[in-house]
Image (tube, grey):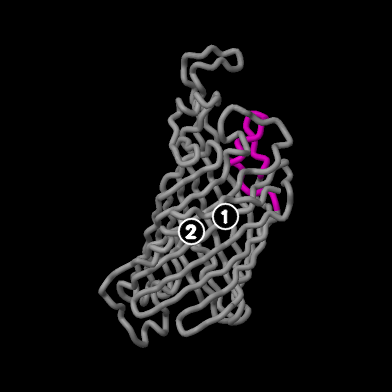
């Protein structure tokens, strides 16, 4: 198993120190009302999972929709045109990939010190490819570009995580994230009798451990937090013959409480993952970068802005709505990977 993921670069560390650099002068409303139903920024930005514990006996249900786009290819830090991909020896290039993910979450706290979190997701993946018009394939003569599309959809992997209280001092808190992910997502999606590109599969194919820690703090009209999560593959390969590498995801964020109902946030998110391990154990293509294991993973730093809204009275009292929008600030991909574009996350949460 390849357990090597790229170390955080110096520029990533320097950028991460800027995440708490929010400035504003407005202070939130204070008093008894906030104590009864909370405040908008008592939850992290909506893209952060497992950010808070509940009181013993409480439940929470959540729904998130995430849209992410990829456009063309990148080799290391440099974007590539389709023609440059062809010049690198590939007969086909991916021109676009879109992912739509619906995430369902359920939380239950058996005690004040432990909250259990169950997560499931449904994915829709679409990838467009273009063949090199100057390459003869399958008896067809070159000279004309041929576009192809790949699509998959279905339920992904399911995870169960225990959020375990670490320490608490005033309005600063830390807890552990200890979870396991089951390989319920398909890794045998095919098209015309051959495996789809690795990135079009719906799960990791392996049992995975998810371990990390989360820290949050509040003071006056401001909030901040940090989370680091590692994904450790517990098997060398899945049922289709390959596995993903271990991965790291880390976020730091700051928030400003506009008033009791609204808060704004900014976040830096860093992800690192190695290339795929193993190899498909059935028929598959070798024409485009997404067909090769070495062209997955890398280092990505994203800048993200968001808002949280908490209904404080009326029929929807206690419901939360939130959104985040982000774009990559830095990308260094393994091999010839797909160039990341923007990400939009919308969410709803309700606890009782």
The residue shown at (41%, 63%) is 17
How far apart are the alpha carbons under marks 2 and 1?
9 Å
In this rendered view, identify the residue nearer to me: 329 or 52.
329
Residue 158: horizontal and vertical position, in percent? Answer: 63, 57
**Quadrant in the picture for residue 18:** bottom left
Up the image or down, 2 lies above or below 267; here it is above
Q: Residue furthest bottom?
A: 32
Residue 191: horizontal and vertical position, in percent? Answer: 62, 32
Q: Check whether the beta carbons of the residues at disc 2 and disc 1 lie within 8 A of each other.
A: no
Up the image or down, 299 lies above or below 223; here it is above
Q: Which residue is mark 1?
A: 121
Q: Which residue is mark 2?
A: 64
**Residue 173 as seen in the image, left or right of residue 218:** right
- SS at circle 2: strand
Q: Which residues are magenta?
A: 187-206
- SS at circle 1: strand
Residue 205 magenta-drawn? yes
First in sequence: mark 2 or mark 1?
Answer: 2
Taking the image as drawn, is residue 264 in sight? yes
**Quadrant in the picture for residue 110:** bottom right
Residue 142 magenta-drawn? no
The residue shown at (54%, 64%) is 228
Residue 261: horizontal and vertical position, in percent? Answer: 34, 73
**Residue 261 as seen in the image, left or right of residue 181:** left
In this rendered view, identify the residue nearer to me: 209 or 85.
85
Q: Residues within 10 Å of mark 1 (few under 14, many from 20)?
A: many
Up the image or down, 294 lies above or below 262; here it is above
Q: Residue furthest front?
A: 10
The residue shown at (61%, 81%) is 111
């Amino acid at each position: 198993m390849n357990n090597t993921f790229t170390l955080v670069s110096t520029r990533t560390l320097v950028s991460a120190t800027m995440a708490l650099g929010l400035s504003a002068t407005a202070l939130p409303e204070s008093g008894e009302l906030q104590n009864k139903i909370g405040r908008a920024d008592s939850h992290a930005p909506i893209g952060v999972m497992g950010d808070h514990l509940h009181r013993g006996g409480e439940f929470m249900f959540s729904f998130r929709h995430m849209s992410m786009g990829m456009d063309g290819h990148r080799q290391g830090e440099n974007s590539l045109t389709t023609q440059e991909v062809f010049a690198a020896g590939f007969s086909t290039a991916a021109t676009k990939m879109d992912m739509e993910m619906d995430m369902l979450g359920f939380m239950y706290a058996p005690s004040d010190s432990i909250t259990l979190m169950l997560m499931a997701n449904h994915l829709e993946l679409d990838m467009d490819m273009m063949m090199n018009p100057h390459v003869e394939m399958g008896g067809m003569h070159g000279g004309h570009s041929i576009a192809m599309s790949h699509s998959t959809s279905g339920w992904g992997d399911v995870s169960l995580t225990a959020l375990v209280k670490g320490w608490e001092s005033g309005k600063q808190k830390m807890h552990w994230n200890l979870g396991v992910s089951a390989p319920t997502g398909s890794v045998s999606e095919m098209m015309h009798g051959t495996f789809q590109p690795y990135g079009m599969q719906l799960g990791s194919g392996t049992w995975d451990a998810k371990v990390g820690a989360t820290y949050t703090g509040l003071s006056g009209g401001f909030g901040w937090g940090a989370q680091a999560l590692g994904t450790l593959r517990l098997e060398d390969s899945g049922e289709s013959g390959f596995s993903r590498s271990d991965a790291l995801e880390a976020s730091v964020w700051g928030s400003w409480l506009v008033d009791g109902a609204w808060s704004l946030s900014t976040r830096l998110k860093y992800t690192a993952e190695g290339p795929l391990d193993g190899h498909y154990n059935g028929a598959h293509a070798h024409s485009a970068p997404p067909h090769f294991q070495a062209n997955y993973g890398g280092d990505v730093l994203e800048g993200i802005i968001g808002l949280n809204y908490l209904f404080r009275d009326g029929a929807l009292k206690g419901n939360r709505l939130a959104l985040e929008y982000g774009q990559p600030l830095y990308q260094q991909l393994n091999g010839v990977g797909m160039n990341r574009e923007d990400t939009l996350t919308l969410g709803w949460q309700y606890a009782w």
